[in-house]
Image (cartoon, helix red, strand yellow):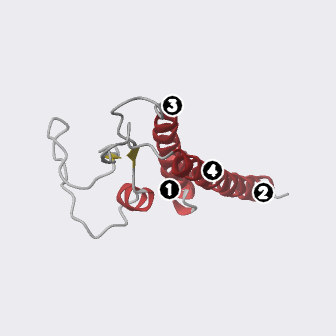
Amino acid sequence: MINKTAGFMFQGIGIPKFEKYLDLTSFRHKLIGGNIANVSTPGYRSRAIDFNAEFARLTSETENLGGVRSHRAHLPLGFHAERPPEPDEAKIIEGDMNSVDIDKEISTLAQNELLFTVGARLLKHKFDGLRKAITSR
């Protein structure tokens, strides 16, 4: 009974969506860090994900159809939360050493850091609200 109640409370206030949001910003941060680390690597292709599209897919807020697995050995099909994000690789422009634009990467890194910070603070407020409700303070 306690597990069902706790599960309902966490689902009801959106904790699983915040978890996916923070996981996705963390994944994106690693991609950007890899791009920055390889700024002088010849032939390196910068990698990125469409954050909004991936978040919609992970939270099932998409109009695309996804397959349902009836057995754990079956391969998942289409759009579903179990498929990890697939980064897009940028093409290398003729004459360039690689496809990393350091100014764009630093800007995207700062934006991603803000997204993570906002998500973490909102999640903290959710837990603060739960704590207040439980302790009546």
- Please name which of the two marks, 4 or 1, marks the residue nearer to the observer: 4
Nearest to N terminus: mark 2 or mark 3: 3
Q: In the rendered image, which residue does mark 4 sit on?
A: 110
Residues under labels 3 and 4: Cα distance? 16 Å
- How dense is the environment of label 1, judged by Cα within 10 Å: few (below 14), some, or many (20 and up)? some
Between 15 and 27, the one nearer to me in the picture: 27
* Residues at marks 2 and 3, CA–CA distance in whole angstroms: 44 Å
Residue occupying the point 32% across, 67% down: 62
Q: Mark 3 points at which residue?
A: 37
Disc 3 or 1, which lies upstream in sequence? 1
Q: Residue 132 carries which label?
A: 2
The image position of residue 136, as x and y in percent, is 81, 58
Q: Which of marks 4 and 1 is nearer the N terminus?
A: 1
Sequence-wise, the earlier of marks 3 and 4 is 3
Q: Residues within 10 Å of mark 3 (few under 14, many from 20)?
A: few
Number of marks drawn? 4
The nearer-to-camera label among 2 and 4 is 4
Q: What element carries label 2?
A: helix
For discs 3 and 1, the disc positioned in front in the rendered view:
3
Q: Where is residue 106 in the image (x, y as percent from the top left)?
A: 58, 47
Query: With 111 as the anchor, is 65 left or right in this view?
Result: left
Q: Which amino acid does label 4 sit on?
A: Ala
Mark linked to residue 17? 1
Mark closer to the chain start, 2 or 1: 1
